[in-house]
Image: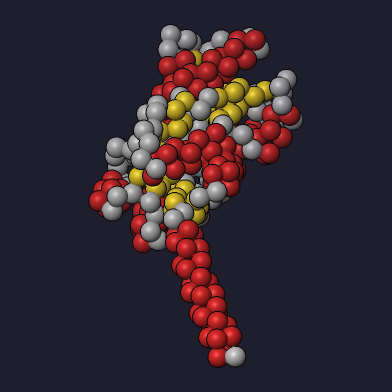
């Protein structure tokens, strides 16, 4: 009887010990997940929502990622710096970053680097070394947009006239490159590019800017990002004038404006690829693997009424 009781007690102790080992193992397994943050310029553009979906998809497939998306409500350097600080405080091991400006985030990225955090850029890089940049060849895509606008104007018999540009700001690397490429397309032509106006990517402000351009008698307008493009299309729709609008990014609103003839075309990026491949690169880096190439061109497609 005593031996039976001793056996039962011993068995009970073994079960408890095994349970504790299992629990400790489970906790250790859970804590081994890679902490990766996506930090974008804002939350309002569908573009960033699609980047997030791509990152989520890769994180789910990989299965060993603790993933979070942080973004300010509007494009603002101070607010984006706050998001990066939050990621550092939250124990981020890697950050996928779409930098609002090339230099504003330098100090906080230096802090992240000192903490051993891997930096990978999606869409727009800062002037701070990252392991990889996944983005559109923005300058080339801007030139494509310019050529599409010129071709449409000439098709309509409009060989001269002024062109307006609605951009985000003078600092965001991606949209600055788009504008540079767009301007290059007009070199040696009979068109005049007016001084660029900035609306911070806000559709309402961009609409007002585009409306002012239309009042000045422009024959074409270029929107450098989603909000700029939506504002441009809405202004053209409201003015009911023969102004050709081309833009950047893909959203339901932009596609609707193209279908209804208020925009000619948009340069559609592949933000899902940026998020998906960016997440895979982040995990590779955290696993000690080499990241290649340093610049990943995620491509662009010209969307018009004929192919949407």
Give x and y (percent) for residue 193: 45, 22
Q: Quadrant of the N terminus?
A: bottom right
Q: Quadrant of residue 126?
A: top left
Task: Specify how the rendered protein is coloured.
Answer: secondary structure
Q: Quadrant of residue 11?
A: bottom right
As drawn, is 245 to the left or to the right of 168?
right
The residue located at (51%, 75%) in the rendering is 14
The residue located at (44%, 55%) in the rendering is 32
The residue located at (38%, 32%) in the rendering is 291
The residue located at (41%, 24%) in the rendering is 180
Of 186 and 19, the residue lying toward us: 19
> Which residue is most to the bottom?
2
Give x and y (percent) for residue 2: 55, 91
Q: Is residue 25 visible?
A: yes
Number of numbered callouts drawn: 0
Residue 56 vertical placement versus 167 (above, below): below
Give x and y (percent) for residue 181: 44, 21
As drawn, is 226 to the left or to the right of 134?
right
Of 284 and 300, the residue lying toward us: 284
Give x and y (percent) for residue 252: 68, 39
Residue 250 vertical placement versus 200 (above, below): above
As drawn, is 301 to the left or to the right of 86?
right
Q: Quadrant of the C terminus?
A: top right
Of 82 and 13, the residue lying toward us: 13
Residue 80 vertical placement versus 139 (above, below): below
Q: Is residue 212 visible?
A: no
């Amino acid at each position: 009887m005593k031996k039976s009781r001793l056996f039962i007690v011993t068995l009970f102790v073994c079960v408890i010990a095994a349970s504790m080992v299992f629990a400790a193992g489970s906790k250790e397994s859970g804590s081994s997940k890679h902490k990766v943050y996506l930090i974008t310029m804002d939350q309002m553009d569908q573009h960033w929502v699609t980047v997030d979906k791509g990152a989520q998809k890769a994180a789910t497939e990989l299965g060993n990622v603790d993933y979070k998306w942080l973004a300010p409500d509007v494009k603002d350097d101070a607010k984006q710096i706050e998001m990066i600080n939050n990621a550092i405080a939250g124990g981020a091991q890697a950050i996928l970053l779409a930098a609002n400006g090339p230099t504003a985030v330098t100090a906080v990225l230096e802090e992240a680097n000192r903490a051993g955090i891997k930096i990978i850029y999606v869409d727009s890089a800062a002037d701070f070394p990252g392991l990889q940049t996944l983005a559109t060849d923005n300058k080339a895509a801007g030139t494509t947009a310019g050529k599409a606008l010129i071709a449409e104007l000439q098709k309509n018999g409009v060989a001269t006239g002024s062109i307006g540009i609605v951009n985000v700001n003078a600092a965001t690397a991606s949209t600055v490159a788009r504008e540079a490429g767009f301007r290059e397309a007009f070199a040696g032509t009979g068109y005049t590019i007016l001084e660029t106006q900035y609306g911070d990517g806000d559709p309402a402000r961009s609409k007002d800017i585009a409306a002012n351009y239309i009042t000045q008698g422009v024959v074409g307008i270029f929107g450098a990002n989603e909000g700029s493009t939506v504002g441009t299309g809405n202004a053209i729709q409201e003015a009911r004038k023969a102004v050709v609008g081309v833009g950047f990014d893909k959203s339901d609103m932009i596609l609707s404006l193209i279908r209804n003839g208020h925009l000619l075309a948009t340069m559609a990026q592949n933000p899902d690829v940026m998020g998906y491949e960016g997440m895979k690169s982040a995990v590779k880096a955290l696993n000690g693997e080499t990241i290649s190439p340093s610049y990943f061109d995620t491509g662009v497609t010209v969307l018009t009424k004929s192919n949407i």
